[in-house]
Image (cartoon, rainbow, N blue to C red):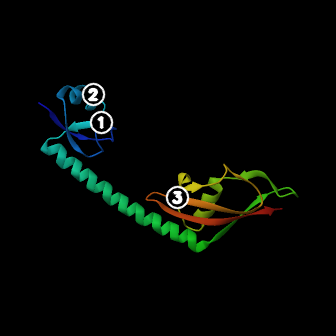
Amino acid sequence: MKTRIILLNDIKGLGKKGEIIFVKPGYARNFLIPRNIAMIANRENITYFENFKSNLQKKFIEETKKNTINAEKIKSIGKIEIFAKSGKDGRLFGSIRKLDIINSLKKLKISVRKKEVLLDERSIRNTGEYIVKFNFKGNIKSSIKVLVSSKF
């Protein structure tokens, strides 16, 4: 006799999150359920999980819309300028990091998370023009030119 369960996580060789599968009762009782990897698939839990999945889908759709709008705003701006102290050779005293770029975009009323900003290196250390890429959730991509100028 097998026990019917709902997987709460993806498990290699067993199934994907949200699938209803059959496993041996001991495996479910002693391993999957205590580790919150699965739950028994009764009517109540199936209804709960379906509601949970629909709420996740709604949140994902809203987040995708927001990210698309942010990506379009970033493309429409085209270029931002950040001022920093530098030497005569153009080398910065310090560096421009992701947070500096995020703060510049905040002034333009664009909210971006740190993990969405992609720099070629950890930071920008010289004056000049750089292309900064953004990778939003939902495979939405954008980029902007960042002009780092010397501040006297």
Earlier sequence position, callout 3 versus callout 1? 1
Mark 3–mark 2 distance (CA, rounded to whole Å): 37 Å
Identify which amino acid the numbered label 1 is placed on: Ile
Q: For the point 33% across and 42% down, which residue is it? A: 10
- Residue 31 tag number: 2
**Discs 3, 1 touching: Cβ within 8 Å:** no
Identify which amino acid the numbered label 2 is placed on: Phe
The secondary structure type at the circle numbered 3 is strand
Q: Residues within 10 Å of mark 3 (few under 14, many from 20)?
A: some
Q: Is residue 73 above or below residue 47?
A: below
Q: Going by the image, does 77 lie left or right of 41?
A: right
Disc 1: which residue: 37
**Discs 1, 2 touching: Cβ within 8 Å:** yes
Q: For the point 62% across and 54% down, which residue is it? A: 99
The secondary structure type at the circle numbered 1 is loop
The secondary structure type at the circle numbered 2 is helix
Disc 3: which residue: 135
Identify which amino acid the numbered label 3 is placed on: Asn
Determine which quarter of the picture holds residue 144: bottom right
Earlier sequence position, callout 1 versus callout 2? 2
